[in-house]
Image: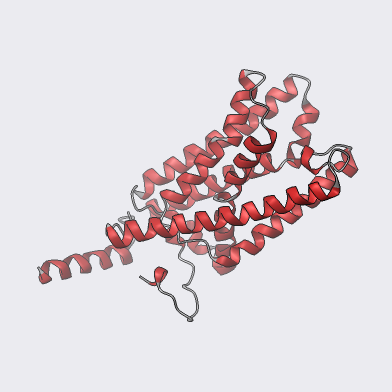
Amino acid sequence: MAIFRRSRAAPEPFDATRYATSWLLSPFFFGCLRLLFSLFAFATLFFTFGWDCTHSLCESAEHSFSYFTDLTYWGLAFYYLFAALHSLSYAIRGRAWLEGWGRVLGWLHGVFYSTITVFPFLVTIVFFALLFEGSFTSTTDAYRNISMHGLNSLYALVEIILPRTPPHPWLHLVPIILILAAYLGLAYLTYHLDGFYVYDFLDDRIHSRGIVAAYCIGILVGTCIVFVIVRYVIWARVWLTERRWGMEGKFSRRDGMRTRSRDVEMVHVRHKG
């Protein structure tokens, strides 16, 4: 398969169907599963807003958009929503909505996919390594933190294992690093505008600037390591499911081109047998 072949030729064109389909689940069921995940994520976010504002914590809700955890969780919610629409549109029409987006938006969707399969693991690692104090203060606090710092990685893992997506292109590391740099700017902008650091390890009043820089570099290196691991886990999934098991994917009955291709292949196999 071209996905595993080393070549100096131009990379394969963007295949929207790979992002809309699964090697295991039918497009319709896969779309419904993605939609369910999206609804849970949005429900968690809006419940958090509602709870904070009904318990005199509206300021906390306003500041949530300064936290990388919350921004990443919003990203997961929206990715799963659009991914569900792509899968369901493919199931119903035989053509994913994503196919009509054009090359640039298709590439950006691929970058979006890379971020939601990398950043959640970073959030989980940083939270439990640096921020978690050993217990939750209430049931609501437990629900919020488990959803945003634990289930977020489950969301990412599902999108790594179930779709037919190709491995992350190395080029996607560039926007991922730029997003981290932009967030660092947002964190310090929040301090200058609102007077607080979103994360203590960024506070140079508590730590020396060298320690703060070390934390930032460590997170950058950790992100790159997670990216590489995720990339090769996806590579292994594609190799195992498509090359070893011959599970090319579950396609819509309305996708005439792929249906004809599969029928021709079956006839060829029968004739050969």
Residue at horizontal 38 percent and vertical 46 percent from the top: 28
Left of 208 or right of it: where is 27?
left
Residue 234 appears in which quarter of the rendering? Answer: bottom left
Q: Position of residue 80 (x, y in %)?
A: 52, 45
Q: Nearer the viewer, residue 196 or 162?
A: 196
Display colour scheme: secondary structure
Q: Position of residue 189 (x, y in %)?
A: 85, 47
Q: Position of residue 146 (x, y in %)?
A: 58, 30
Q: Nearer the viewer, residue 143 or 89?
A: 143
Question: Number of labelled discs?
Answer: 0
Left of 108 or right of it: where is 14?
left
Q: Is residue 139 above or below residue 232?
A: above
Residue 112 visible at all: no
Q: Is residue 273 above or below residue 230?
A: below
Residue at horizontal 73 percent and vertical 40 percent from the top: 67
Residue 238 appears in which quarter of the rendering? Answer: bottom left
